[in-house]
Image (cartoon, coloured by chain):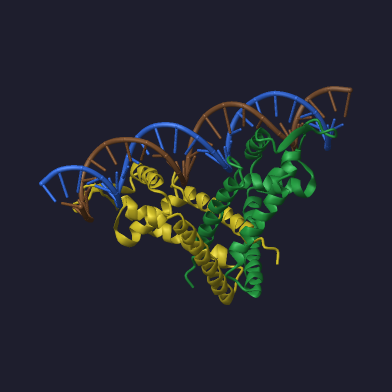
Chain colours: A yellow, B green, C blue, D brown
Amino acid sequence: MKHDAVMLMGRIHDLTQKWLRGELVAAGLSGVVPSHGDVLALLFMKGEATMHELAAFAHRTRPTTTVLVDKLEEVGLVRRMQSEDDARSVVVVLTAEGEALRGSFAAISKKLASRVYSPLSKDEGEMLEKLLNKVLSNLEAAKNAESAKSD
Amino acid sequence: MKHDAVMLMGRIHDLTQKWLRGELVAAGLSGVVPSHGDVLALLFMKGEATMHELAAFAHRTRPTTTVLVDKLEEVGLVRRMQSEDDARSVVVVLTAEGEALRGSFAAISKKLASRVYSPLSKDEGEMLEKLLNKVLSNLEAAKNAESAKSD
DNA sequence: TGACAAAAGTTAGACATCTAACTATAATGT
DNA sequence: ACATTATAGTTAGATGTCTAACTTTTGTCA
């Protein structure tokens, strides 16, 4: 055992992010980066979402989400609206142009999965997901335990 | 199969990097980040290295490595020297202060591995490394195949 | 009911990283 | 031998992300 899983995951993460950027450019979406994809992914699922929900889903901070949505609004894929329930909230929705990209995004996402899973058998793919979930749950539990200590 | 391995690895990567930053601060190394750790790791192994070697080992670009070494020199952990063989090359070496941190870095590195591997059995740990290596090799092969096409 | 705390979002400033362009030196080929 | 090409490293400028601080609105509770 080389105990290098963290390094391996870092490398895989780097390569997949880089590849994704290339795909987005190839799809005519210069200036759109993988994090924007996470924002759009939630909108494709839910139709609309608050900044807060988008930030949580994309695992980014709210300031970062502000910038991400600024960009998506600038290129015309989403629109900000005032919430009717809560005057503090902003609701983000897809424009027609944004909705039109649903298919492209699904295709890129499928291509990414196939790229990563192709060297693995079905069993191996499932095993990998199981092991990663174990590791992640454990890290999140440890993190929560530590932040709870500072009460 | 959820095909979410990429997302899981991204999350694990984020959490481990964040934790590492905290450990470095706790070790009195404010301003030193995980990438600096990669630079130091090679110096702990080889004693000295050129900028080019450090960049390759840390998987960063040479401009980034310039900045990393600037910082390490500023906090007194390494020193730049002119190479005697090649006037273009810079050789980076550890200072006494840098050498003194060997133990702390080994401890942090061990703690990180234990954090990640603790929820896994020995067999599972080995399996995880095997699967990640498969995925990474495949991605690197695909990348090389694509860049070769543009000849 | 009115003060104070919590939450949603933005702005400002910092930082790690990247690509492109530049300087200086070494290697190569005719 | 000299011109061209390649390599080592740095500088300059851009970008994605973060934390801290701020504004506005909502919730709480004495």
**In-image side of A66 versus A82 (left or right):** right
Quick one: A120 or D11, which is closer to the camera?
D11
From the top left corner, tell me how far across and down residue A33 is, in percent.
46, 48
Q: Residue at x 74, y 33 (%)?
A: B80
**In-image side of A133 versus C2 (left or right):** right
Quick one: B105 or A40, which is closer to the camera?
B105
Whether residue B141 is situated above or below residue A31 in the rendered picture: below
Q: Quadrant of the N terminus of chain A?
A: bottom right
From the top left corner, tell me how far across and down residue A149 is, in percent.
47, 58
From the top left corner, tell me how far across and down residue B96 is, in percent.
76, 39
Q: Residue at x 51, y 49 (%)?
A: A21
Whether residue A30 is situated above or below residue A146 in the rendered picture: above
From the top left corner, tell me how far across and down residue C15 is, in percent.
54, 38
Q: Quadrant of the C terminus of chain A?
A: bottom left
Is there any visible trace of residue B139 in the rendered image?
no
Quick one: B118 or B48, which is closer to the camera?
B118
Is there any visible trace of residue A63 in the rendered image?
yes
Marks counted in the figure total 0
**In-image side of A87 versus A47 (left or right):** left
**In-image side of C3 versus B22 (left or right):** left
Q: Residue at x 64, y 44 (%)?
A: B36
Q: Residue at x 73, y 48 (%)?
A: B42
Task: Name the residue furthest bottom.
Answer: A123
Whether residue B112 is situated above or below residue B126 in the rendered picture: above
